[in-house]
Image (cartoon, rainbow, N blue to C red):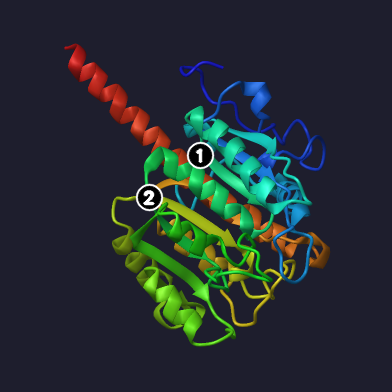
Amino acid sequence: MSSTDSPRGPIDSSRVPRYAGPATFARLPRLDEVGRTDVAVVGVPFDTGVSYRPGARFGGNAIREASRLLRPYNPAQDASPFALAQVADAGDIAANPFNINEAVETIEGAADDLLGTGARLMTLGGDHTIALPLLRSVAKKHGPVALLHFDAHLDTWDTYFGAEYTHGTPFRRAVEEGILDTSALSHVGTRGPLYGKQDLTDDEKMGFGIVTSADVMRRGVDEIADQLRQRIGDRPLYISIDIDVLDPAHAPGTGTPEAGGLTSRELLEILRGLSSCHLVSADLVEVAPAYDHAEITSVAASHAAYELTTIMSRQIAAEKEAKEAKEAEDAK
């Protein structure tokens, strides 16, 4: 596929039933079928960094399976994301499940390769450990990035059992490594008990703001989205979503559930409210299908990934249009 070809979209559900055929994300083509892509949906089946219930290594494929029901037009954003840009399923990054340090290096290297093609990443985890190597790779391309972290937990703890790389430590490491823009960091949906008040003190020192799930409930999604847009500005933005940001009623299939979370509707509306932000890549992690039922969690996750993919596709199309207009003006 050349850069001038029209994007190849999902399999036509009027010809092949949605429950038939390979379960790529949204029934999109594989990367090897199109040759190049603007947005690469890639799985990372790794959950060695979890501290409680394992199983997120199966999350990416559960999300893909649930995404069979996604359709090509997104009315909430008035966009057909798979027609605006080429989106393809890049398969999985195979990381060593017995060596976290090696796995982190493998994920970073694979992300470097995909980003090096010009694609943006929509990564399906996996546990939250994977956010660190993904952020490292994105920062090589864009410099320190703004971060919106949707999660019940802070994930800025120092170590677990002396281990630096776990699903509870990625954003402390990212701050320490200078790959985040500390003027534009925010947790969203945080709630639940902590080890001590010092957790909040340390988190604030790193530059994070906190929007709790109670804030979302009391202030509403529009006000929260506006606050986040103002904090981010025009900086390159990375969004990281731990599915446990949702209440267990909306996402039972996760490793560390906390009561009192967002509804799936609130999460989707906040994401839609960020459509004007410069989203350079994103991840969605911690879906553990063994604890799910009726695909509640993976359906919610697939829709969140769809909104993020739509935002990236719209921005890619707008950037291409602006570039073509400039080239036409320069040619006069």
Instruction: Name the residue at 74% across, 51% down.
Output: 99
Quarter holding the C terminus is top left
Q: Is residue 226 left or right of residue 332?
A: right
Disc 2 versus disc 1: distance between alpha carbons? 30 Å
Q: Is residue 237 left or right of residue 53?
A: left
Q: Is residue 228 among the parts visible in the rendering?
A: yes
Instruction: Name the residue at 76% across, 53% down.
Output: 57
Could you say which disc has been placed on residue 80 in the image? 1
Is the residue 303 above or below the residue 18 in the image?
A: below
Helix, strand or loop for disc 2: loop
Say which quarter of the image contains residue 176.
bottom left
Residue named by callout 2? 144
Amino acid type shown at disc 1: Ser
Instruction: Name the residue at 39% across, 75% down.
Output: 204
Circle nearer the viewer, 2 or 1? 2
Residue 309: horizontal and vertical position, in percent? Answer: 53, 45
Amino acid type shown at disc 2: Pro
Residue 77: horizontal and vertical position, in percent? Answer: 45, 50
Q: Tell me if mark 2 has few (under 14), some (14-19) or many (20+) residues whose alpha carbon lies within 10 angstroms of its own.
A: many
Residue 244: horizontal and vertical position, in percent? Answer: 63, 69
Instruction: Name the residue at 48% across, 57% down.
Output: 174
Residue 80: horizontal and vertical position, in percent? Answer: 51, 39
